[in-house]
Image (spheres, coloured by chain):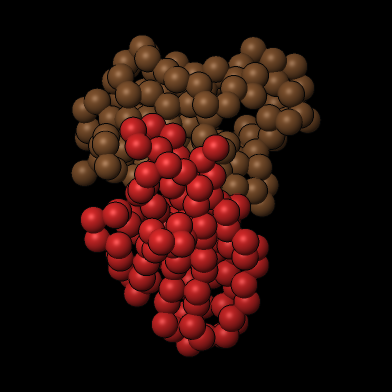
Amino acid sequence: AQTIHQWPVAEIKAVGSPLSLGCTIKGKSSPNLYWYWQATGGTLQQLFYSITVGQVESVVQLNLSASRPKDDQFILSTEKLLLSHSGFYLCAWSRGNNQAPLFGEGTRLSVL
Amino acid sequence: GDSVIQMQGQVTLSENDFLFINCTYSTTGYPTLFWYVQYSGEGPQLLLQVTTANNKGSSRGFEATYDKGTTSFHLQKTSVQEIDSAVYYCAMSDPGYQNFYFGKGTSLTVIP
């Protein structure tokens, strides 16, 4: 069975500090990977997607970047956090075409 | 551009009431449509996927119907229970399954 793990579970960071969030998928080779952001009480906004190692497409940047250094790993980062970065970050994976994204448990980020 | 509109922001029902949530979409062609459920503090879970091939889907007592003529799709359940209290999102994929568009979500509260 496939599993998806996000880390950390929660972060409290200062404005202007760097950020790195991670996501690992086990049990599936070459998954499609996605990053989403959700404001408190808001909808899900897709940020990035990746269909293969080393290739990441941006949907909405929000001063964030993403990388896929390994087949099973997806990283979301920024060098300088803004207050507007606060929210719930969700990683998701899918088997590929015709398959819906399946979400991890998320990382809750508070920027103060 | 591609979009999904989910008008019902909050719905309050009593147990055993009938649930109906409607979404409309805007895109070219006939997309695949999805329903997700998100419980408080968790990542969204895929509830149903409906393609043009079958026009209907069902899971956990929920049924989704897709009407190409009116570019709408809805989620219904005959008899809701308190455990169904959650936020329900409709979503749509682009043809390449690389971008997914989510509605604003419907927060369902079921009163026992």
| Viewer-nearest residue: B4 or B111 | B4
- The answer to whether residue B65 is left or right of residue A63 is left
User: What residue sits 68% from the left and 30% below the top?
Assistant: A85
Q: Tell me if residue A55 comes above or below residue A38 in the rendering.
A: above
**Can residue B40 be seen by looking at this rendering?**
no
Q: Percent from the top left, x then y, of residue A5?
A: 39, 36
Q: Quadrant of the N terminus of chain A?
A: top left
Task: Look at the image and give the colour of chain B.
Answer: red
Q: Tell me if residue B97 comes above or below residue A72 in the rendering.
A: below
Q: Percent from the top left, x then y, of residue B4?
A: 53, 50
User: What residue sits 76% from the left and 29% below the top?
Assistant: A83
Q: Percent from the top left, x then y, of residue A97?
A: 26, 36
Task: Look at the image and give the colour of chain A.
Answer: brown
User: What residue sits 57% from the left and 78% below the top?
Assistant: B110
| Viewer-nearest residue: B52 or A29 | B52
User: What residue sits 36% from the left and 70% below the top?
Assistant: B63
- The answer to whether residue A102 is left or right of residue A58 is left
